[in-house]
Amino acid sequence: MADSLYDIADRALEAIAGGLDRLHRDAEGVAETLSRLGEQARPREVPPLPREDAACRHLSAGLASARRVDSGLAEALAALAPLLHWQRIPEHVPHPPDPFMDDYAFAKIFGPQGVYPGEDFMMGLFIIGPQQFYPTHLHQAPELYWLFSGPTEWRFGEGEPWEEKPPGALHWHAPYHPHAMRTGDVPFFALWAWTRDIHGDYRIVGAADSAPLHRS
Ligand SMILES: [Fe+2]
């Protein structure tokens, strides 16, 4: 019998938890993320409807990069990704440049339309195409990013310098800590989690028109 979605998701979650513990155990936010992940119920009740989004065309490049970060995890994610409900939320970026919306998508493993419902907890995958800019935003929910591709550039406040982050880097955004991201020649592909207060404030605080990172 073929593996169920739940078996495939559980293998991916095991690989995620194992990779975070092995590669980033002492990094800020990892203990909190692993603890919240371990607390989550996994009812095998309402599977998400698989949904592909335009930005999924970048998945193969993202997964290829992820293989260099953690090959076992990348294999588990490659099996799971096509079964997820990939979506976009226009409110994330008001008045976005048209190309952004067709170049950005996320899918939840925990959370609404996720494999599991999540209890004030969301975890999933996030993809953004090359030469894109995600404006400065902040939210009440603490957030973990584990970057599988790159480099990407990040800025933690309007007017702050851009910082280059390589594939494999980890970020923890404390509540209300502003952050923006821009991609260069390669797509952004990452694990993302909101560990609590998922229904709290979310605000864009920066202009949506900052130039993406152009590499020659
Ligand atoms: Fe964020």
Image (cartoon, rainbow, N blue to C red):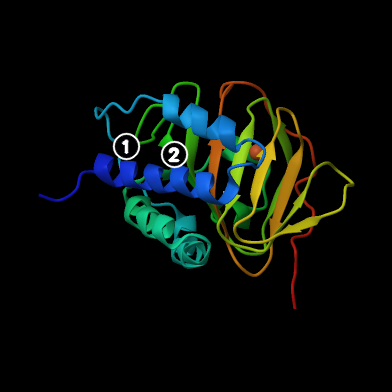
Mark 1 and mark 2 lie on one chain; the one further toward the N terminus is: 1
Instruction: Name, please, the residue furthest toward the bottom.
Output: 216
Looking at the image, residue 103 sits to the left or right of residue 132; the answer is left
Callout 2 crowding tier (Cα within 10 Å): few <14, some 14–19, many ≥20: many
Looking at the image, residue 69 sits to the left or right of residue 169; the answer is left
In which of the image's four quarters is ligand 1 placed? top right
Residue 126 in sight? no
Camera-side residue of 178 and 38: 38
Mark 1: which amino acid?
Pro
Residue 172 vertical placement versus 216 (above, below):
above
Q: Which residue is the site of mark 2?
A: 108
Residue drawn at 50 percent across, 27 percent down: 36
Residue 201 vertical placement versus 55 (above, below):
above
Residue drawn at 55 percent across, 57 percent down: 148
Circles 1 and 2: CB distance less than 8 Å? Answer: yes
Give the SS element for disc 2. Answer: strand
Tell me the quarter of the image containing the C terminus: bottom right
Mark 2: which amino acid?
Lys
Dividing the picture into quadrants, the one containing residue 210 is bottom right
